[in-house]
Amino acid sequence: MTQDTILKIDNLKKYFPIKKGLFSLSKDYVKAVDNVDVFIKHGETFGLVGESGCGKTTLGRVAIQLIPATAGTIYFMGENLTELNKSDLRKLRPHMQMVFQDPSSSLNPRMTVKQIVGEPLIINEKLKGEALNKKVIELLYTVGLNEQHLYRYPHEFSGGQKQRIGVARALALNPDFIVLDEPTSALDVSVQAQILNLLKNLQKKLGLTYLFITHDLSVIHYISNRVAIMYAGRIVEVSKTKELFEKQYHPYTKALLSAIPIPDPKIKKKFKPLKGEVPSLVNPPSGCRFHPRCTKKMPICSKIEPELKEIEDQRFVACHLYK
């Protein structure tokens, strides 16, 4: 793990047991994240893209140990999170935060904005009275709100304002790393742009590192420095964002980018939709998980799972086409 790396994940697995039968014995597992390797550098925005149900959100939550890993290691700021006890992990919590997908469900409807944003300050920094008031107002101004919003409840805000409250709460303890789980997917397009610009400005001002989870490639193109493509619990390609949009190596990545519409009626673009369905994470296909839908599959693809290998500088691909 190099000094410029804030998060390094090796061979990470997260399996969810499926309870069956009278005594709720586990017979099967949902393999939501399966042998994932990822590293994120200080100060960058690392994008994580994939279809719904591919394991993106699970990876984000396991990365900061909101849910425990089944196997593998997670190094955050030099500490192996998977080996820490609850007390030591709690000490690291202020350094890593999360902004959730749906602000309406992630904000307590019975709490005012002051209570929502102030809660981590009360618990961790023991702030109260005027000191708490001052800090919460400062955080609200940081995300584009003000003191007039202090005693309002979440239902009194628009979707974009709710997400700003969620960002303010995440910033309360001066974190180094924030997981952003589809923070703009529940918002209108114009509001999406406002939130993305806010996140970019905050990153520049506060030196933050982001793991940005989304299924929207146009958002990734705008905000991320590097991007990983995820399919059925596995990472299939990692690249610098600019290079990924110029050239794709993995057949799944090519299919994803070919589906992006071009806003020009003069340009005729051939779109070939992927055949078949996303595989079950309970019984994923043998070998490469994408091979049942791949137009370039070979006999080896159904037998041996390809490793994520560096085929160019900072360009990683898990595909038998590239040995």
Image (spheres, helix red, strand yellow):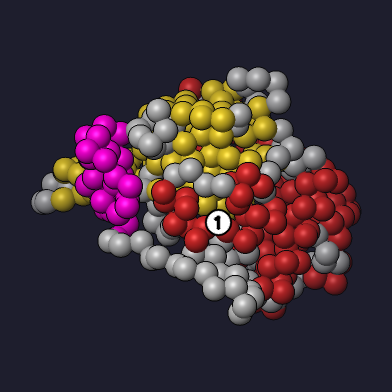
Residue 295, given in percent of the width and then of the height, sits at 32, 52
Screen quadrant of the C terminus: top left
Q: Is residue 317 above or below residue 294?
A: above
* Magenta stretch prevailing secondary structure: loop
Residue 27 sits in quarter? top left
Q: SS of the residue at dot 1?
A: strand
Would residue 223 be visible to someone looking at this image?
Answer: yes
Q: Give the residue displayed 70% in from the left and 21% down from the top.
A: 3
Membership of 15 in magenta stretch = no
In magenta segment, residue 302: yes
Q: Which residue is mark 1?
A: 214
Name the quadrant of the N terminus: top right
**Dot 1 amino acid type:** Thr
Which residue appears at 67% of the width and 59% of the height? 166
Which span of residues is magenta-colored? 277-305
Return the residue nearer the eye: 92 or 121. Answer: 92
Left of 89 or right of it: where is 146? right
Quadrant in the rendering for residue 198 = bottom right
Q: Nearer the viewer, residue 81 or 137?
A: 81
At 30% across and 62% down in the image, what residue appears? 275
Query: How far from the left and from the top, in percent, is residue 312?
Result: 56, 30
